[in-house]
Amino acid sequence: MISIDPKSITTAVLQGYLQGSVGPRPIAFASTIDENGNPNLSPFSFFNVFSANPPILVFSPARRVRDNSVKHTLINCEATREVVINVVNFDMVQQTSLASTEYADGVNEFLKSGFTPIPSDLVKPLRVKESPVQFECKVTQIIPLGTEGGAGNLILCEVIKLHIDEAILDEKGAIDQHKIDLVSRLGGNWYSRSNQGLFEVPKPLSTLGIGVDAIPEHIKKSSIFNGNDFGKLGNIEALPTIEEVSIFVKQNFSIKAVLSSDDKKNVHVEAKKYLDENDVLSAWKVLLAKK
């Protein structure tokens, strides 16, 4: 066994040890607005429930390790003292990961991630329609834990209204843990699905995904793809070039038969196969090859 003084290693290495060993951690998909009413949406895995009477949730947007900057969620909570915490299940995990991308101030993560914003009843931040449980909250206290990169900021929230999708309830009206199908964070790219186990969600750390809003409408309206597929398609840094698509088609004879079909559904089915194998670039090449 190795023994480590936290002060003897870099914050990034220490954070890796902490996140790799303390888990699985639930995910707070926090919706906030700034002082001008602009929405923001971002996931946080430093999160849990700490009281039922009053109902208190706590999550922590940490200062960025690389440059000690703070996140928009923290700034918005300080300014408006309101937040909606949406829980994350497996059906929305890829889009949630996309929303965690460091888009510039003013970029609407609802559009980029492809989630549906719906009004809250008691607070101004919007809810995520696709989330099976949504908590409208008032921020009661913010506790900074330090001033350097990696330092957390505990945001204590009192739940003033919750919304639950009836589809996740059992015959007694309680939440069915199989139906809600929650996911949680571990270290690195690893997630855990509550009823099935580990899986990975690769996410670019230094690049920006094109976003679900950049996907053509005929693809977004397809019955073949689900939210996780859209999250994968939107999480690519740049679309393949015409030359790359042409080379791909020439090297894959089976694709030519699919592309010759008048039914775009066949093309979408072929692209879906690549998405299921996490080969997003090839999926895009199939989609872009069809004129």
Image: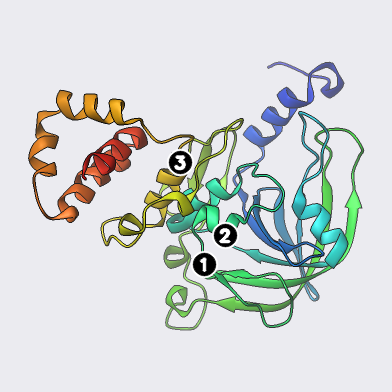
Q: Please indicate whether residue 224 sits to the left or right of residue 129 in the image.
A: left
Tell me if mark 2 has few (under 14), some (14-19) or many (20+) residues whose alpha carbon lies within 10 angstroms of its own: many
Quadrant of the image occupied by residue 236: top left
Residue occupying image coordinates x 48% and y 54%: 213
Residue 101 percent location from the top left of the image: 60, 43
Query: What label does residue 171 carry, if any?
Result: none
Secondary structure, mark 2, is helix
Residue 225 percent location from the top left of the image: 31, 55
Whether the residues at callouts 2 and 1 have beta carbons within 8 Å, the answer is: yes
Residue 224 percent location from the top left of the image: 26, 57
Residue type at tag 1? Thr
Q: Please indicate whether residue 202 sits to the left or right of residue 250 in the image.
A: right
Residue occupying image coordinates x 79% and y 76%: 53
Secondary structure, mark 3, is strand
Quadrant of the image occupied by residue 119: bottom right
261 in relation to 161, above or below? above
Question: On the image, numbered disc 2 is attached to which residue?
Answer: 110
Residue occupying image coordinates x 32% and y 62%: 221
Residue type at tag 2? Phe
State the residue in front, 257 or 49: 257
Question: On the image, numbered disc 1 is attached to which residue?
Answer: 116
Question: On the image, numbered disc 3 is attached to which residue?
Answer: 198
State the residue in front, 59 or 234: 234
Instruction: Give the mark, 2 or 1, whose residue is nearer the N terminus.
Output: 2
Tell me if mark 1 has few (under 14), some (14-19) or many (20+) residues whose alpha carbon lies within 10 angstroms of its own: few
Instruction: Answer whether residue 194 is visible to the viewer in this image.
Output: no
State the residue in front, 194 or 253: 253
Secondary structure, mark 1, is loop
Look at the image and tell me in which quarter the C terminus lies.
top left
Q: Please indicate whether residue 120 sits to the left or right of residue 158 in the image.
A: left
Residue type at tag 3? Leu
96 in relation to 149, above or below? below
